[in-house]
Image (cartoon, rainbow, N blue to C red):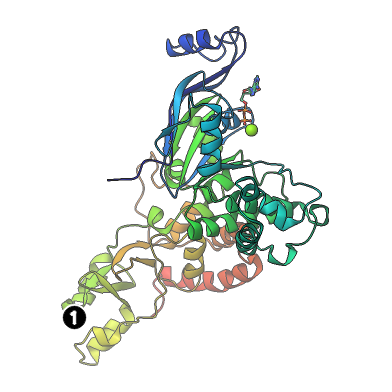
Amino acid sequence: MTAAPAVEAKNLFKVFGRNPKDAVKRLRAGQSRTEVADAGTAAVIDASFTVQPGEIFVIMGLSGSGKSTIIRMLNGLLEPTAGEVLVQGRSVTGASASELRGIRRQSISMVFQHFALLPHRTVIDNAAYALEIQGVGKAERRRRAMEILEKVGLGDRAEAMPDELSGGMRQRVGLARALTAGTDILLMDEAFSALDPLIRREMQEQLVELQRELGRTIVFITHDLNEAMFLGDRIAVMRDGRIVQNGTPEEILTDPANDYVAQFVQDVDRARVLTASAVMEPAHATTPVSAGLRGALRSLRELQAGSVFVVENRRLLGVVSDRRVIRAIKAGETDLRAIVDASVPTVSPDDPLTDVVERAVETTVPVPVVDAEGRLVGLIPRVTLLAALGNVPPTTQAIPIIEPAPSVPQSDLVASLAELGRSETDAAGLTASAEADAAGLTASAKGGDR
Ligand SMILES: Nc1ncnc2c1ncn2[C@@H]1O[C@H](COP(=O)(O)OP(=O)(O)O)[C@@H](O)[C@H]1O
Ligand SMILES: [Mg+2]
């Protein structure tokens, strides 16, 4: 038996105003949000989605698109005009006040943008507040609150008062309170939006870590696409009350459902979002180790490449350059395995492009993508990497001219790396090594390394 979804929203409508039911009827009949404006404000229109246990599900959209209205229907703060919400298989819609209290206590808690801490209580008593309401004894609730405070990096501030904390710390206490409550599902409405960018980034990383460790289900609302992309296992994009796309960050980036979403995702920090598997190319430049030196030479010639990856039962052994192969053949050697360079840096399919870039600056060959079993599942040539980072579509309408070996203009490489540096990595360090290496790249593209 499979577990019930954590949250299920079925054809939810919420209309504020004079005649909500009538507005829903007309929306169902195909009228637009504007056309039903006389009957009320259609805040949410026919929204359906399912959140699986352990998922971070992000609802993203501009201000006024209906995000808060949806999340408030999930825990019964708002009654839908039509449709139904199920939490862990239990219907929230139409639940009595006491049933709702039970659901909120046991299943679903909420963190707001400006989290109201109780000003005359210490950090730990604030964090333990939900347990206090649940009637958990003092020693036990302080023990559980302390455990969570340590996880959110506030272990040493447990006895501080809220006004002694920075905004970021206060928000952490809010998060700690929600986590201490022990509910399986956490609703977070713009929970990080009031924080300054560096602290916000830190909180995002911490949330992902906590999520991995604690396995809670999180519904996270944001108007910030980068935040959505970083946090979300899946993202629902909202516009004017409707969910216009629901997919993984990669799907939304690489296959936006419409122009609106495409416009939205244009300036996203792609290096944090895209993973190696999303951009890798089929591994053609390979040769089986059993084919020996002659086989490697044949592959190099057929592929017109300067190096090939050597595999054994699809497992990557390493890389050999044309130069090494020819030298070995001249020397009368026959063993390909002996000359394989196994030190080639690899990435795994789930690694973000930031990691791929780190590898790419260390080497002039494409970066091999290797799965947990050591199998070569794809290659990422630098051009592919740069195109992905620079938002260049992988194919163009025009028929491509077959160009000589792709040489990446140094300026592009440096610019892309600098771009990356802005987000996270040490820009200066990367740029310097990229510059040094770009020279090597150009040389090898011209047929160097000989
Ligand atoms: N209680 C309310 N009464 C009337 N209109 C509301 C109410 N709450 C929200 N709205 C309207 O519903 C729309 C969606 O609001 P909201 O869900 O808060 O959007 P978001 O959280 O995406 O910014 C907006 O047009 C807003 O003005
Ligand atoms: Mg809101």
- Give the residue at x 50% y 42%: 107
Q: Position of residue 6 (x, y in %)?
A: 43, 41
Taking depth in this image into account, of 424 and 197 the one nearest to the observer is 197
Residue 18 falls left or right of residue 26: right
Q: Position of residue 280 (x, y in %)?
A: 37, 57
Taking depth in this image into account, of 88 and 45 the one nearest to the observer is 88
Q: Position of residue 205 (x, y in %)?
A: 58, 58
Answer with the quarter of the image where residue 371 lies. bottom left
Image vertical order of residue 25 relative to residue 367, above or below: above
Image vertical order of residue 414 relative to residue 250, above or below: below
Residue 256 appears in the figure: no
Total numbered labels placed on residues in the image: 1
Q: Position of residue 18 (x, y in %)?
A: 61, 8
Taking depth in this image into account, of 161 and 196 the one nearest to the observer is 161
- Give the residue at x 27% y 45%: 1
- The kind of residue on which mark 1 rests is Gly
Answer with the quarter of the image where residue 240 lies. top right
Find ligand 1 in the image and state its quadrant: top right
- Which quarter shows the C terminus? bottom left
Image vertical order of residue 314 relative to residue 230, above or below: below
Residue 164 falls left or right of residue 178: right
Mark 1 lies within 8 Å of ligand 1 (Cβ measured)? no
Mark 1 crowd level (few <14, some 14–19, many ≥20, 10 Å Cα): some
Residue 163 falls left or right of residue 97: right
Answer with the quarter of the image where residue 157 lies. bottom right
Local secondary structure at mark 1? helix
- Give the residue at x 18% y 80%: 292
Residue 260 appears in the figure: yes
Taking depth in this image into account, of 109 and 317 the one nearest to the observer is 109
- Give the residue at x 73% y 62%: 158
Q: Which residue is mark 1?
A: 292
